[in-house]
């Protein structure tokens, strides 16, 4: 029995090391250079001196609760052939002026900008949580996709992965029935990072597991 336990522990260690060794990473970053209509270009002042001026001079960047929008990430898988197994993914979003605290002295609810994946309209999808930040500062929020969110990553032809992202701006203003925007937010970039194993790696890991089961059966442990 001690040998079985020792073998199992060693197997788990090898499995973990093999998974890390075989894993590959692919990433895509969207910025104002690639999506100038929505992401503010580097070097552009998101708040040029006056709130109303910022709203009207940069309407596509500085957006309120009635101006929700989304985008699509497409990552490329580099594999020698066959299929891919996605291990995990993160989504990092750099945003400006996310007022998650304060609530305007009780006059308004705090700014809660909800990020969803798997939707192009805001309806349905899977929530990753909300952006973090402080008034008139740039902050990066990194979300780790859980199993439900990873299921929204669409793998096509084992060469690309596509993820639709949606931002529900100042969601509490909507649910509280306000008729005009108060909280605004600007995005500078969004980065999707995906860890995956190409088919040969998945086969190796599966073979290790099958080998353990066979050995245990020969030992009449199973």
Image (cartoon, helix red, strand yellow):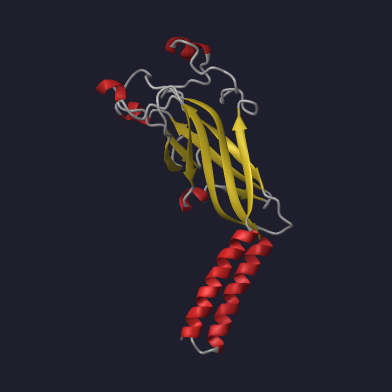
Q: Is residue 185 left or right of residue 182?
A: right
Above or below residue 191? Residue 211 is below
Residue at x-position 54% and y-position 48%: 89
In front: 151, or 185? 185
Q: Is residue 222 left or right of residue 179?
A: right
Above or below residue 58? Residue 203 is below
Measured from the top left, where is residue 150 in percent x and y?
A: 52, 50
The residue lying furthest to the right in this view is 80
**Residue 172 can be seen, yes or no:** yes
Residue at x-position 39% and y-position 22%: 183
Residue at x-position 70% and y-position 59%: 82
Label total for image:
0
Measured from the top left, where is residue 39 in percent x and y?
A: 56, 26
Above or below residue 191? Residue 15 is below
**Residue 222 can be seen, yes or no:** no
Measured from the top left, where is residue 18 in percent x and y?
A: 61, 65
Quarter assignment of residue 74: top right
Quarter assignment of residue 192: top right
The residue lying furthest to the left in this view is 106
Residue at x-position 49% and y-position 87%: 221
Q: Is residue 136 left or right of residue 23?
A: left
């Amino acid at each position: 029995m001690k040998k079985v336990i020792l073998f199992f522990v060693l197997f788990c260690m090898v499995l973990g090391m093999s998974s890390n060794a075989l894993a590959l990473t692919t990433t895509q970053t969207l910025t104002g250079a690639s999506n100038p209509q929505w992401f503010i270009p580097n070097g552009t002042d998101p708040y040029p001196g006056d709130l109303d001026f910022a709203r009207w001079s940069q309407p596509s960047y500085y957006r309120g609760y009635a101006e929700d929008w989304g985008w699509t990430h497409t990552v490329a898988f580099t594999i020698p052939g066959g299929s891919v197994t996605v291990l995990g993914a993160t989504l990092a979003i750099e945003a400006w002026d996310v007022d998650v605290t304060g609530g305007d002295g009780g006059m308004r609810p705090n700014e809660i900008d909800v990020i969803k994946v798997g939707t192009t309209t805001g309806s349905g999808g899977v929530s990753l949580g909300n952006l973090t930040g402080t008034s008139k500062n740039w902050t990066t929020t990194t979300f780790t996709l859980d199993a439900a969110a990873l299921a929204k990553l669409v793998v096509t032809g084992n060469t690309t992965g596509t993820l639709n992202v949606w931002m529900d701006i100042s969601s509490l203003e909507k649910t509280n029935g306000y008729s005009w925007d108060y909280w605004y937010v600007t995005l500078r970039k969004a980065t999707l990072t995906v860890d995956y194993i190409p088919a040969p790696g998945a086969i190796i890991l599966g073979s290790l597991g099958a080998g353990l089961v066979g050995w245990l059966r020969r030992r009449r442990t199973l």
